[in-house]
Image (cartoon, rainbow, N blue to C red):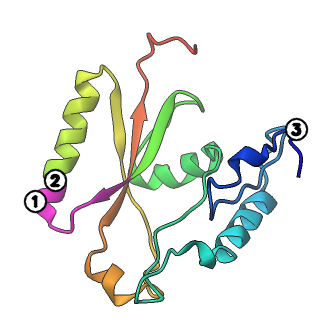
Amino acid sequence: MKAQGLYDPSFEHDSCGVGFVCDIKGKQSNAIVKQGIEVLHRLSHRGAVGSDPKTGDGAGILIQTPHEFFAKITASSKIDLPSLGSYGTGIVFLPQDAKEREFCKQTFSNVIKEQDQALLGWRDVPIDDSRIGKGAKATQPVFGQIFIGRNNNLSDV
């Protein structure tokens, strides 16, 4: 094929096992999320499984911040979210050991404070590990979701 639009044949060797589903105008849609999950199901050829076919590479999807959803679920964790764009969130893989996990969370807290940001809180992430393999289950981390409020003195640039 010839180069056209966003396609350039010189990149054919890159990104094997990557799929993209998006709305070019940035419209949020559950249909796009469902299509993204379908892409993951169809990418088993990417070499993402080992000797245990139930243990994969942890591939996932990237979506826009679902602020309304986060505002709803954080209420039960006593996290008061500011408006969209005034906080960041991420999933953190934490140790299984409670003391090590608390050390990691405290380290996050210290760095956030050093950066003059605000730790809004942590949320325990509900998971369904009934379909993962033995290898993955043996080393499965604890999934924590962190919410960090931005310093109000920062600009939107």
Residue positioned 56% across, 62% down in the render: 60
Callout 2, which amino acid? Glu
Q: Which mark is residue 5?
A: 3
Callout 1, which amino acid? Lys
**In the picture shown, does residue 23 fall above or below 138?**
above
Mark 2 → mark 1, Cα distance in angstroms = 5 Å
Q: Which mark is residue 102?
A: 2
Callout 3, which amino acid? Gly
Looking at the rendered structure, the secondary structure element under dot 3 is loop
Question: In the figure, is residue 35 to the left or right of 89?
Answer: right
Mark 3 or 1, which is nearer the eye?
3
Question: In the figure, is residue 94 to the left or right of 89?
Answer: left
**In the picture shown, does residue 33 fall above or below 26?**
below
Residue positioned 15% across, 67% down in the render: 97
Q: Which mark is residue 99?
A: 1
Q: Where is residue 58 shown, x and y percent of the image?
A: 47, 68
Residue positioned 57% across, 15% down in the render: 156
Looking at the rendered structure, the secondary structure element under dot 1 is helix
Q: Nearer the viewer, residue 20 or 132?
A: 20
Q: Where is residue 92 shown, x and y percent of the image?
A: 35, 53
The answer to the question of whether label 2 and label 3 lie on touching residues, with beta carbons closer than 8 A, is: no
Q: Which residues are magenta?
A: 92-102
The answer to the question of whether label 2 and label 1 lie on touching residues, with beta carbons closer than 8 A, is: yes
Q: Residues within 10 Å of mark 2 (few under 14, many from 20)?
A: few
Q: Where is residue 34 shown, x and y percent of the image?
A: 74, 67
Of labels 2 and 3, earlier in sequence is 3
Residue 97 is one of the magenta-drawn residues: yes
Q: Where is residue 66 shown, x and y percent of the image?
A: 63, 47
